[in-house]
Image: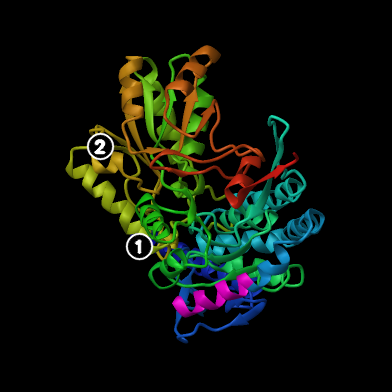
Amino acid sequence: MASETESEAASASERRAEIHERHQETAEAVVPEQRGCYIGGEWVESDSGETFETRDPTTGDVLAELPSGNAADIDRAVAAAEDAFVDWGDASPSKRQRTLETIADRIRSERTAFARLETLDNGKPINEARADVHLAAEHFRYFAGITRATEGETVPTDGSRRVTTIKEPYGVVGAIIPWNFPLLMAAWKLAPAIAAGNTVVLKPAEQTPLSVLKLMAEIDDVLPDGVINVVTGFGSDAGEPLTTHPDVRKLAFTGSTAIGKQVMKNAAENVTDVTLELGGKNPIVIYPDADLDRAVQTTIFAIFYNTGECCTAGSRLFIHEDIEEEFLNQLATAAEGLTIDDPLLDSTRLGPKVSEEQRERTLGYLDAAREAGASMLTGGGVPDDEALADGCFVTPTIVRDLDHDHPAVQEEIFGPVLEVFSWNEYDDMIELANDVEYGLAAGVVTSDIDQAHRTAADLEAGTIWVNQYNDFPTGMPFGGYKQSGIGRERAQETIEHYTQTKSIDISVR
């Protein structure tokens, strides 16, 4: 027995060393050499000279040391963006279109390196990182086309005047993005902003800044200096002064609802327009007529995609009592079958959480749920695999027997945690499904299309997926109800959030 245990320990130690070696070799190949703030087309250090480290959540190793930006750096970046706006704001739609198409091409040409970098910095499985990079390129390509579709109107009058409207950019846009989809969230903000003729100051999340820096290195020769500026650092040091800067005329933020509220308060001081994409605590409703295999796979994808670090994660499951036990047995088996391993491997389905802080936050919610009498159908902790001991891993978890008003149900855990509730009365189920402060997304699984439409109409959410989840076709508007945000991203109407309407009234008599 002792020799068997020693052999297992030796095997785990070898695999642990292999993971570290694989990540170190990948980092040497893809971590960008340019590690400064990108301001006015130049790579610069922070005004303070202070730096911070970004770490690989799989191994704990330092990936890079970066400037810790502050208010002075934001001032420099906003000034550079203002200077660039003089020309970029007047650039023709065809020039902006060509620029965005070239950015899309550059991302695509470096897609392998971008995906590996996202996996190193964020911890997401490489297959998911590849999908993110593809979507980022497509996002720039989509808004390249939108540049030629931004039009004004002629307003009917009594004939004594001619009234027309035109769309004009705001000027400098301040953009703050989260750590869960670093490159993709940058694309969501940058593409519509510059397509509309704005210039941008972008602050990436301090946990995952590397893919944005690589993007700027790849497109340095594409954009006029100052059109996009990047200030790395922490929210309190760099994000806060960006949201209070009087020369920033538009703010676009993706992140938690709590921080989004503060961004909105800061914006109010200068009456700055805002787009907010905030948190979610999203329901999935399973009807008794659902195809069980499809329902299981839809639920697995809804909650465990990106290790649950997804604002749209389907984290509250409402399963009809007629199929509850059979469905949950299949669901638990499917969750236990997910491969938790090095996210650089194609076979991995769940990687680590982005940081030790986020792992402990998730585990804290699970501890609180247990104390409240909840049971874990599966998961509830960290993997037993010693080869993964250096990473921020949490096992896929399914929670039962928890009151719906418990904080673990009401608040966004942002991890691979699904809470299960049984239902048999439609009205009661809908009331509970809507009984959170969020309204970002929801899922419905049923074979009855009329039932699907009725449920979609009654659910308070900006996106309803039926018999699928986390699908984002290009051009589909995305945004939330209630405290999940303001505005819509990813669609033609998004350009409305990055332009202002000017009315021109001309007397003709």
- Dividing the image into 4 quarters, which one contains the N terminus? bottom left
In space, the residues marked 2 and 1 are separated at their CA atoms by 24 Å
Q: Is residue 258 magenta?
A: no
- Tag shown at residue 357: 1
Looking at the image, which residue is at 49% across and 34% down? 462
Q: Secondary structure at mark 1?
A: helix
Kind of residue indicated by mark 1: Glu
List x then y, in percent, for residue 110: 73, 62
Q: Is residue 25 visible?
A: no
* Residue 73 highlighted magenta (yes or no): yes
User: Which percent across, then down, holds residue 84?
Assistant: 67, 71
Q: Name, please, the residue furthest toward the front.
A: 509
Query: In front: 453, or 399?
Result: 453
Q: Name which residue lies at 57% across and 79% down.
A: 36
Highlighted range, magenta: 70-82
The image quadrant that residue 439 belongs to is: top left
Give the amino acid at mark 2. Ser
Residue placed at 50% from the left, 63% from the top? 15
Residue corresponding to mark 2: 375
Give the crowd class for mark 2: few <14, some 14-19, many >=20 residues within 10 Å: some
